Image (spheres, rainbow, N blue to C red):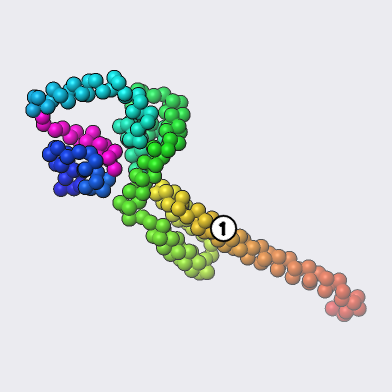
Amino acid sequence: MNKQEHAEQDYLAGMKYKDIADKYHVSINTVKSWKKRYGWQRTQNKKGAHKTAKRVHTKPQKGAHKKEDNSDELTPQQELFAQLVGGQRIPLYRAYQEAYSATKPTLSTAMSQGSRLVKEPKIASRIRKISQETARKHDWSLDRVVDSYTFLHDESKTDILTNGVRKATADAMIQSLEDITDVLGLKQSSKAQARKTNAEAAMAEAKLADMQDDKDDQMDALTNLMSKLAKNVPKDDQNDN
């Protein structure tokens, strides 16, 4: 069984959200998300069910609005929004439409509210954590991206020396690496390194352009030199020829 299935058994056995989260090293919101997604339901006797129904009926009327404003825990809609943005990297407005589908938001509402939600500290923090979990799950790290970039650099250098520059292929591969680091949120931890890498790439491209320009300049200089030499040849020498 996987982690989620073990957690479900613990939940059905009566374990609390916090205890499950501590046991499997996940957040309480993740446990709640599992419960909603997989439909976990505890069996209760009639006496317990009656008490639970009474508590659920009275509590929202007293403090539902206050809890949403002051609690650090996310609502189910906010958690789903964070999962879609941090885990699946879909656009903010699409994530809002999915998370708040019950309200049938318009496109303009989804765009404005999606941008607002992602700026809320507790939601932004949750999105970052999900992104990091996704990075670990797929075994991507900054070191691995740098290794891939180094391989690309060496292969590109060899290819340039043997076949000349094929810019479209090199640009496409560099862009794919940049997309990976952006998707997994790795650039945030190494902005200086990213600036250095981009600068080196720009310098390399500029040097290649200069090399081509130098060849043209050399040809122009040679032509001008021959012209000057021709003008300085004495007329007698020209007549002799």
Query: Up-down: is 43 above or below 227?
Result: above
- The local secondary structure at tag 1 comes to helix
Q: Evaluate whether residue 159 shows in this view.
A: no
Which of the two residues, 205 or 52, is positioned nearer the viewer here? 52
Q: Is residue 209 left or right of residue 224?
A: left
Q: How many marks?
A: 1
Residue behind mark 1: 199
Quadrant placement of the C terminus: bottom right
Please, what is the dominant secondary structure of the magenta stretch? helix
Which of the two residues, 148 or 127, is positioned nearer the viewer here? 127
- Whether 154 is among the magenta residues is no
Q: Residue at x 21, y 47 (%)?
A: 23
Residue 89 picture location, percent across and down: 38, 42
Q: Evaluate whether residue 3 shows in this view.
A: yes
Residue type of the residue flagged with mark 1: Ala
Residue 130 picture location, percent across and down: 34, 44
Residue 43 picture location, percent across and down: 11, 31
Query: Up-down: is 109 above or below 140?
Result: above
Q: Residue at x 61, y 63 (%)?
A: 207
Mark 1 Cα shell of 10 Å, populated few (<14), some (14-19), many (≥20): few
Which of the two residues, 136 or 201, is positioned nearer the viewer here? 136
Residue 127 picture location, percent across and down: 38, 41
Which of the two residues, 57 or 5, is positioned nearer the viewer here? 57
- Whether 38 is among the magenta residues is yes
Q: Is residue 186 left or right of residue 39?
A: right
Q: Which residues are magenta?
A: 27-44
Q: Residue at x 67, y 66 (%)?
A: 214
Q: Is residue 140 left or right of residue 33?
A: right
